[in-house]
Amino acid sequence: PLDHLCINYFLCVLQEEEVVQDEELQEEDQEVETWTKNMKACTCDCESADSPTRTPAILPPVAPTSLPPAQSYLLKCMPECPYHRPLGFESGSVTSEQISCSNQDQYTGWYSSWVPNKARLNNQGFGCAWLSKFNDQFQWIQIDLKEVAVVSGILTQGRCDADEWITKYSIKYRTVESLNWIYYKDQTGNNRVFYGNSDRSSTVQNLLRPPIVARYIRLLPLGWHTRIAMRLELLMCMNKCISIG
């Protein structure tokens, strides 16, 4: 009888665990559905006190890709970030002090016209992009957001006046300078590889699903055409919009 009771007890425990797992899976499905449904064009309620931005510029939402596993704090913000706004590379609101790169102290002479501050989307003329001083996989360009924020995507272009661009890259991030850098991962837990450009002028958009919550963002070129050259814009999450479609 004791053995029978023990078996019944463990069967009950297993059944309860299965029910909990089913409920968790249903909650995850609901989160994904909340994140993906009703993807409409919108204008931002920029006057709202809880709006993440007062900038009216906004990019329309794009159909999401598959969702990689991530830390819980990233998953929690997913349903709140279905829309995006540019950080301000192109507009100039991102200052030169916020953008840095590897070997920046060596940017003298001709290279002084191709510093990381020039890596602004749709920049034109001589010195229209960031050119890496060296062409290897140890190079990077970094953005300091000045505070912890939610980054939802990246736009890249090549050099405006020559056939030079990056073809793929990875991303690192951290919340404070004292912490180690963390690679953005894919569904398998490997460092995610983002595919970049195939010409000098087209804009390639990569959305982050889930978004990154961090202050510092680094792009690390992994492949390039001719040389490492980049113009870019970061996309920030919007969580307060009014549907118009």
Image: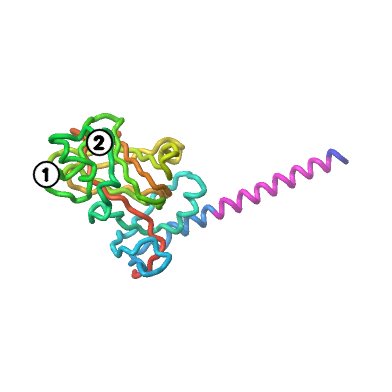
Q: Does residue 243 appear in this view?
A: no
Magenta residues span: 4-27
Please say whether residue 9 is one of the residues in the magenta stretch: yes
Secondary structure beneath dot 2 equals: helix
- Residue drawn at (33%, 64%), measured in percent from left and top? 54
Tell me residue 128's x, y (percent).
16, 45
| Residue that extends furthest to the right in the rendered view of this protein | 1
Q: How crowded is the residue under tag 2: few (<14 C-alpha within 10 Å), some, or many (20+)?
A: some
Tell me residue 229's x, y (percent).
21, 39
**Residue 61 sits above or below residue 177 on the image:** below
Question: Which of disc 1 and disc 2 is earlier in sequence?
Answer: 2
- Residue drawn at (39%, 42%), measured in percent from left and top? 173
| Disc on res. 126 | 1
Tell me residue 125's x, y (percent).
11, 47
Q: Nearer the viewer, residue 54 or 158?
A: 54
Secondary structure beneath dot 1 equals: loop
Quadrant where the image shows the N terminus:
top right
Q: Name the residue that disc number 2 marks.
A: 104
- Residue drawn at (45%, 39%), measured in percent from left and top? 179
Q: CA distance from mark 2 to mark 1?
A: 19 Å
Is there a contact, CB below 8 Å, between mark 2 and mark 1? no
Q: Quadrant of residue 104?
A: top left
Taking 19 as reference, is 238 left or right? left
Tell me residue 18's x, y (percent).
65, 47
| Disc on res. 101 | none
Q: How crowded is the residue under tag 1: few (<14 C-alpha within 10 Å), some, or many (20+)?
A: few
**Of the residues shown, which amino acid type is indicated by label 2?**
Gln
